[in-house]
């Protein structure tokens, strides 16, 4: 699993786009979290998670503060979450998560990316059932038993726990994320999470040929360049 996670992180880094896109993405997500759940991170766990994630990705404080201040003012844009699913080059599976204030624009942009890559948008649920939606916490360690015991004592619903190459990976349902992270930080106050996110993990990987892989990478780049695309998940296997 560790190698698969590393491949995915390398893929994300390669297709993350310019810093301005990254800042815009986080600004929008922080704004939505703050507007929907309140501007106090202590009372809004989704906002707190998003702020922590933004800081880890080196998003400047002024970008975070601006998004929260915007949410304090009320009014503003009304963003909604939209998810598209489909089949990319070589039949690989793709999930595209968006935040939009204009569904027609977003669908048109995403559909154009699929069309240019000769890919196909599917119906809702067409590929999501072949992914596991879960929280993933990965950190250095080798004491799997103590980790599991701490999680069980905190009444965390653990989907899986693995120890590979000196890294422990904990998988939980998305709604157990904060409980699991708190338990691990109490067990190891100085823990540094190599992976700390709620994501879609494919149940199987799809290898692509060299030509298909080239088209796939361009496809993901086009998606990440779309104004409303927040995240792209896939099941492509990288060497």
Image: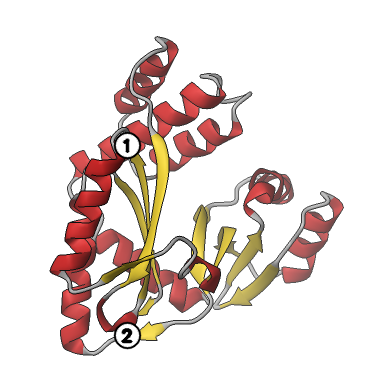
Q: Looking at the image, which is closer to me, 213 or 106?
A: 106
Give the numbered dot on residue 59: 1
Whole-percent x, y for residue 137 in the image: 58, 58
Residue located beneath label 2 in the image: 239
Q: Left or right of 238: which side holds 188?
A: right
Above or below residue 18? Residue 236 is below
Q: Report the coloring of the rendering.
A: secondary structure
Q: Looking at the image, which is closer to me, 194 or 13?
A: 13
Q: Secondary structure at mark 1?
A: loop
Residues under labels 2 and 1: Cα distance?
30 Å
Whole-percent x, y for residue 186 in the image: 72, 45
How many numbered badges does the structure rendering display? 2
Name the residue at 52% across, 25% down. 36
Name the residue at 48% across, 30% down. 33
Give the numbered dot on residue 93: none
Q: Earlier in the sequence, mark 2 or mark 1?
A: 1
In the rendered image, the residue lying farthest to the bottom is: 209
């Amino acid at each position: 699993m560790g190698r698969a996670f590393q491949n995915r992180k390398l893929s994300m880094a390669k297709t993350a786009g310019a810093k301005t896109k990254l800042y815009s993405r986080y600004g929008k997500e922080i704004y939505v979290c703050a507007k929907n759940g309140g501007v106090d991170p202590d009372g809004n766990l989704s906002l707190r998670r998003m702020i922590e994630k933004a800081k880890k990705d080196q998003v400047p404080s002024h970008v975070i503060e601006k998004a929260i201040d915007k949410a304090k003012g009320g009014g503003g844009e009304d963003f909604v979450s939209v998810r598209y699913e489909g089949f990319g080059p070589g039949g690989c599976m793709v999930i595209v998560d968006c935040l939009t204030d204009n569904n027609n624009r977003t669908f048109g942009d995403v559909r154009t990316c699929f069309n240019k890559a000769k890919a196909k948008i599917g119906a809702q649920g067409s590929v999501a059932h072949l992914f596991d939606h879960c929280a993933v916490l990965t950190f250095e360690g080798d004491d799997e038993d103590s980790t599991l015991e701490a999680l069980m004592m905190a009444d965390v619903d653990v989907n899986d726990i693995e120890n590979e190459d000196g890294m422990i990976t904990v998988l939980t349902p998305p709604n157990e994320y904060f409980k699991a992270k708190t338990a691990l930080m109490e067990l190891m106050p100085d823990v540094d999470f190599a992976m700390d996110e709620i994501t879609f993990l494919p149940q199987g990987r799809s290898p692509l040929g060299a030509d298909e892989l080239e088209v796939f990478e361009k496809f993901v780049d086009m998606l990440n360049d779309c104004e409303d695309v927040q995240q792209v998940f896939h099941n492509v296997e990288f060497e």
